């Protein structure tokens, strides 16, 4: 799961740079398809590893926590 977390953080960074440069109008975000491997993983250890990496990135300011989630599989629309 470390590889997946790094891949998704890289994706967010690349999209953020494109947004800042004016090439992309939408803010960077992860989609349900991006998180499919995470959701399909049954290992709690792997999920915890992924979540720890994402939390660490958020704590260091690499990931904005003002995301809007509209994935109905985790309870509908809410802001984190």
Image: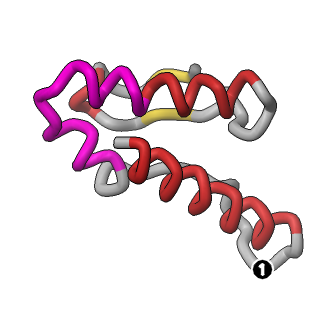
x 80%, y 32%: residue: 61
Q: Which residues are magenta?
A: 35-50
* Quadrant placement of the N terminus: top left
Q: Is residue 78 above or below residue 34?
A: above
Magenta-span inclusion, residue 33: no
Pick the residue in front: 18 or 40: 40
Numbered disc 1: secondary structure? loop
Few, some or many C-alpha atoms within 10 Å of disc 1 (few <14, some 14-19, many ≥20)? few
Residue 55 at x, y percent in the picture: 59, 23
Q: In which image quadrant can residue 26 be found?
A: bottom right
Q: In which image quadrant can residue 65 be found?
A: top right
x 72%, y 73%: residue: 24
* Quadrant placement of the C terminus: top right
Position of residue 1 in the picture relative to residue 80 (left or right): left
Pick the residue in front: 21 or 4: 4
x 40%, y 27%: residue: 49
State the predominant SS element of the stretch in magenta.
helix
Residue 37 at x, y percent in the picture: 23, 48
Number of callouts: 1
Magenta-span inclusion, residue 38: yes
Location of mark 1 (residue):
23
Residue 12 at x, y percent in the picture: 62, 55
x 36%, y 21%: residue: 48
Outermost residue, right side: 21
Pick the residue in front: 19 or 57: 57
Position of residue 54 in the picture relative to residue 28 (left or right): left
Residue 53 at x, y percent in the picture: 54, 31
Q: In which image quadrant can residue 44 be found?
A: top left
Position of residue 64 in the picture relative to residue 69 (left or right): right
Position of residue 28 in the picture relative to residue 50 (left or right): right
């Amino acid at each position: 799961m470390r590889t997946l977390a790094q891949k998704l953080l890289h994706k967010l960074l690349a999209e953020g740079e494109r947004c800042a440069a004016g090439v992309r109008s939408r803010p960077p975000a992860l989609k349900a398809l991006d998180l499919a491997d995470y959701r399909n993983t049954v290992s709690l250890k792997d999920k915890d590893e992924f979540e720890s990496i994402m939390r660490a990135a958020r704590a260091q300011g690499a990931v904005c926590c003002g995301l809007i989630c509209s994935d109905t599989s985790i309870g509908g629309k809410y802001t984190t």
